[in-house]
Amino acid sequence: MKICYNEKLKKLSPYLFIEIDKKKKEAIERGADIISLGVGDPDLPTPKHIIKSMQEAVTRSENHQYPFGAGLLSYRKAVAEWYKKRFNVDLSADEVCALIGSKEGIGHMHLGFINPGDVVLIPEPGYPVYNTGTIFTEGVPYFMPLLEKNDFLPDLGAIPSDILKKAKLIFINYPNNPTAAVAPKEFYLELIEFAKKNNIIVAADAAYSEIYYDENEKPSSFLEFFGAKEIGVEFHSLSKTYNMTGWRIGWVCGNKDVVAGIAKVKDNYDSGVFQAVQEAAITALTSSQKCVEDARKMYKERRDALVEGLQKLDWKVNLPKASFYVWAKVPEGYTSSQVVAKLLDEAAIICTPGNGMGKSGEGYVRFALTVNVPRIKEAIARISKIKW
């Protein structure tokens, strides 16, 4: 039997992080002592009080049935309370929808709002799922370069008028993956006016908002700013904040009509988020946040060790204010892919090529702070022995 793939599926590039994981496993099979700084998957376990909550919740029979709908009311209220405390944003229960991780919601969003030929404005380099959803709905991607000269912010004024006439959706992501940039208040105000003027829905991806390094410079929520709820939503996740990547739990919140559209898509594609996981998430959001504070301190130590080590080797890299990524320029004369291959072959270090997340990422590599300080120092020692 000849298998014929859907034409949309053929348009997809191999999922970058699956390919990185494949190379990692191949190197381990060859006996290499791999230091993996590639995939953004926290290496620490989920905090014990969250695990305990899950253990108790999973024993209750009412949690064993289909969890249809937008999520437990108690979960959506916990999200709203967290937003009020963290960002001073008021949310009602109908402005929140539980997600099976924010990736799922981002991917499904296009199905609610994009028709064939509609334009989706996508930051690049950026999270591949923004474009994946566009391809699946036969939308047209318009990539907005994130350049160092613009502080890794999209130049909204540079988008052509003929593109804006067809644009229905814009994705933004701050703190940013992969560049680690943080957006200032002025950008959000500009974005809101831009979206209103052009009748474009804003989808803000805030998965890294709680990984920051200065209490006086906490990343903002898009929803903090006047008028934001009129034109957009924000996606969030417990994955990075609470080391819960495998649990698959997140939410979308903001404009209730946009939230309702995403919820309607989900009603027809999945059966909701396992209720026991929702209960554990409530515990995460409403109990002591010391575990998050401790994680920030740990990531700061790792960030400092990696950045200082690379700078001593004359790598050009800025000190990130947020996220657990370091966005580094490659040594002169090399492409992103060549550096990734050289680090793997000669130092058994895995990292992500910048151009794998968009052509504007050429000339950079992304390191994830997902190993401890001694391993980071070992990585620096290995890099120091490479001849560039």
Image (spheres, rainbow, N blue to C red):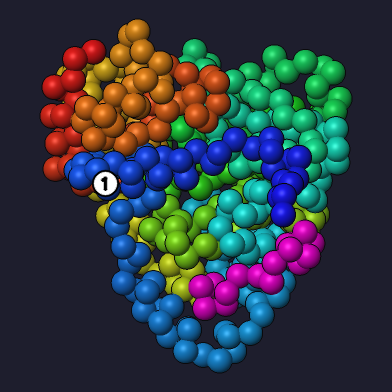
Residue bearing the label numbered 1: 28
Asked which secondary structure carries label 1, the reply is helix
Quadrant of residue 34 in the image? top left
Amino acid carrying mark 1 in the image: Ile
Q: Nearer the viewer, residue 337 or 329?
A: 337
- Residue 268 colored magenta? yes
Question: In terms of depth relative to the viewer, which is nearer, 29 or 218?
Answer: 29
Q: Which quarter of the rendered picture does the C terminus lie within? A: top left
Q: In this view, does 309 lie to the left or right of 129?
A: left
**Mark 1 surroundings within 10 Å by alpha-carbon count, few (fewer than 14), some (14 through 19), many (20 or more):** few
- Note whether 156 is above or below 250 in the view shown: above
Q: Which residue lies furthest to the bottom in this view?
A: 61
Q: Which residues make up the magenta segment?
A: 263-278
Where is residue 228? Give x, y as percent.
Answer: 70, 42
Whether residue 132 is situated above or below residue 252 in the rendered picture: above
* Magenta-span inclusion, residue 182: no
Instruction: Note whether 231 is above or below 357 in the view shown.
Output: below
Picture residue at 37% right of the left edge, 20% below the top: 338
Name the side, left or right, on which 234 lies relative to 230.
left
